[in-house]
Image: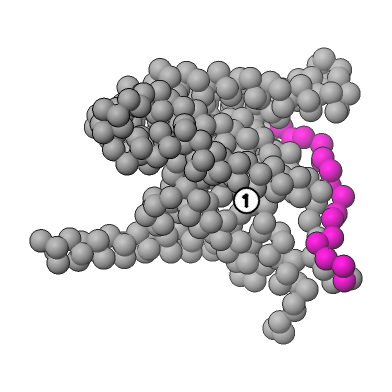
Amino acid sequence: MDFNPAYFWQILANGLHNGALYALLAYGYVLMLTVTQRTNLAHGAIFAFAGQILVLATSLAYHTLLFTFSGALGFGILSAAVITAIVVVVMAREVLPKFVGRSPNMTIVATLAIAIMLMEAARLAADGRDLWLAPVLQMRVELGLSDSAPSIAAVQLLNLCVIFTLLLGVELWLLRSMVGRSIRAVADDAGAAALGGVNARGIVVLTIGLASALAAVGGMLAVLYFGNMSFGSGLTYGLKVLFISAAGGFSRPLFAAAGAFVFGEAEAMWDGYLPIIWREPAFYSGLALILCLRGNSQVMVHKKIV
């Protein structure tokens, strides 16, 4: 098959949106992990729950309350933001901080229970049906001046602007604000930070809330483009972000976001050139191989040090 540059660039453009969603999720996940030192299996569930509430509330406002579609969409966004915020506040203040410093298995079980609860709540509220939004801002936007330039939907461009603005804003806030310095201090050594006057528990609560808010925004943006959020999407996105972040070594939120973005582009390239049915097995196997190689290299380094 001859190489088609126009097709190649269009495939890359198609991967921008999914890569940005992965990046937003991975940034929040690693930010939370560096502070809590605990795996949060509910991160992807928050992403899916916010999107599902958006679809449910919009459908209710449009079909039952007889709003116009724009009014129903605004009602759905507001409802998703409020309901997800309540869930996040309860989780960040009353649940997860209790497990910080305890057995990692306790956190895994607790966050898995939260994820199942959120998925089941959304499923029951939708009566087991997949609801869909009407297409939003689907007109195409050219990313170049030539006739063969790639294009994306206007809603994708809007989502990309929101996501990258959020990532840049949070990163600058972490680097330059007093609170950001406190977050980095707790991530480095919570005990030493507490001795230095930092409210370690407050920082943990704030970080969990911020990371979950990023996931919720990502879920709502995803629904605006795809029109739907299935009940298993939270698990799928959450596991991928967990694997991607682990493969990168959980070093820094921004590095995790960059790696997740590349992963999304790689998925798009696979979809464009290879059988889609083999994509998930191939990518999960690749991520597992990276984790095994990283584990072996760390064991070798430890042996040399010892």
Assign the magenta stretch its main secondary structure. Answer: loop
Spot occupied by residue 264 in the image (x, y as percentages of width and height): 59, 57
Q: Is residue 90 above or below residue 191?
A: above
Magenta segment range? 131-146
Q: Is residue 47 left or right of residue 29?
A: right
Q: Residue at x 69, y 42 (%)?
A: 162
Q: Residue at x 75, y 79 (%)?
A: 4
Q: Please name whichever residue, 150 or 169, is drawn nearer the observer in this view of the structure.
A: 169
Q: Nearer the viewer, residue 298 or 62?
A: 298
Indicate yes or no whether the magenta region holds residue 140: yes
- Amino acid found under the numbered disc labelled 1: Ala
Q: Pointer 1: what residue?
A: 20
Where does the image place residue 248, in percent across and percent down from the top left? 41, 57
Residue at the far top in the pictured view: 65
Residue 217 position within the rendered picture, expressed as x and y whole percent measured from the top left:
63, 35
SS assignment at label 1: helix
The quarter of the image holding the C terminus is: bottom left
Q: Residue 62, located in which quarter of the rendered image? A: top right
Q: Is residue 140 left or right of residue 75?
A: right
- 226 left or right of 260 in image: right
| Mark 1 nearby-residue class (10 Å; few <14, some 14–19, many ≥20) | many
Instruction: Name the residue: 82% across, 40% down.
Output: 136
Position of residue 220 relative to residue 91, above or below, is: below
Q: Quadrant of residue 46?
A: top right
Q: Is residue 89 left or right of residue 144?
A: left
The answer to whether residue 84 shows anywhere in this view is yes
